[in-house]
Amino acid sequence: MARTLRFPEGPLVFEMARGESLATHHKGLPGTLGGDRVVLGKWSTGFEKRAVEEAVLISPAFASRWLGYLNQSEHWSLDELTARWSDLARTQKRQVSFIVQISSFPRADLLQDGSGLEPGQGSLDLDRALVTYEKPISRGLDLSDSLTTTHTDARVEARITPLANLSSDHWRKLMEPWWVALAPSLAGMRPEFLKAPSRYDYCLGDYRTAFYLVEAPVSKEMECAPSLTLHLRNGDRERNARFVLREDPKPKATTNTRRKR
């Protein structure tokens, strides 16, 4: 199965139907993320690990599921759906976008009740972002050999736009805001009754998180690649998120049987 990076004239019908089904069964908007979300880091509450760092690819498939969910739950008209998709396709034209969240949370000790947590000291500055993908190269060896195709890694420098840097006295408050309320270029995906969080909604504390919009130009070679990898440099740490665009078809199972004589 292949996924496109370029936004067509209208939502992808199959993916939109999946989003509508999720809304009908009250599965929640996070269910529309699917394979377009990669967890970058987890934080332990002392009892369980929670995903607090992630990268989300704004693909046409994901956008179709998301808008399908909202179309079903907010009872949009056809004009509303068309206008939202057109606005999204316009802002995403000839580029691929990611939403990145990185966090710095206190360290929890399994033997403590949480009162003696060590404050998180990590930087939330995103210094550099790259998108890499496999690029096919064809070259002739000699007259007796046909063209041989190999692959090499190609990379594209990405543009980083800070969206928010938030802190709180409890980690749950930082998981509540939807990043679509922070990025103007994703206004077409914004739920009708969702407001952008302000600094007055959060009190200062040791739980910190930052949201970024990362954008890179799309080429035909990138569209044909089997996968994309987003490389994020944060100080001396690098986070990587791989997104599969094309899955190799699974070979059919074969059975080796012999007829008895």
Image: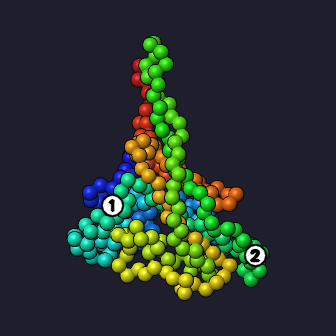
Towards the viewer: 206 or 254: 206
Q: Pointer 2: residues within 10 angstroms few (<14), some, or many (20+)?
A: few
* Residue labelled with disc 1: 89
Kind of residue sitting beneath label 2: Glu
Residue 169 visible, this orientation: no
Towards the viewer: 130 or 72: 130
Residue in view at x 48 percent, y 46 percent: 227
Q: In x, y percent, where is residue 107? A: 72, 72
Residue in view at x 40 percent, y 68 percent: 186
Q: In x, y percent, where is residue 81? A: 27, 69
Secondary structure state at the residue bearing disc 2:
loop
Residue 15 in which image quadrant = bottom left
Query: Is tag 2's residue or tag 1's residue first in the polypeptide sequence?
Result: 1
Q: Pointer 1: residues within 10 angstroms few (<14), some, or many (20+)?
A: many
Residue 254 versus residue 216 in the image, above or below:
above
Tag nearer the camera, 2 or 1: 1
Residue 146 appears left or right of 83: right
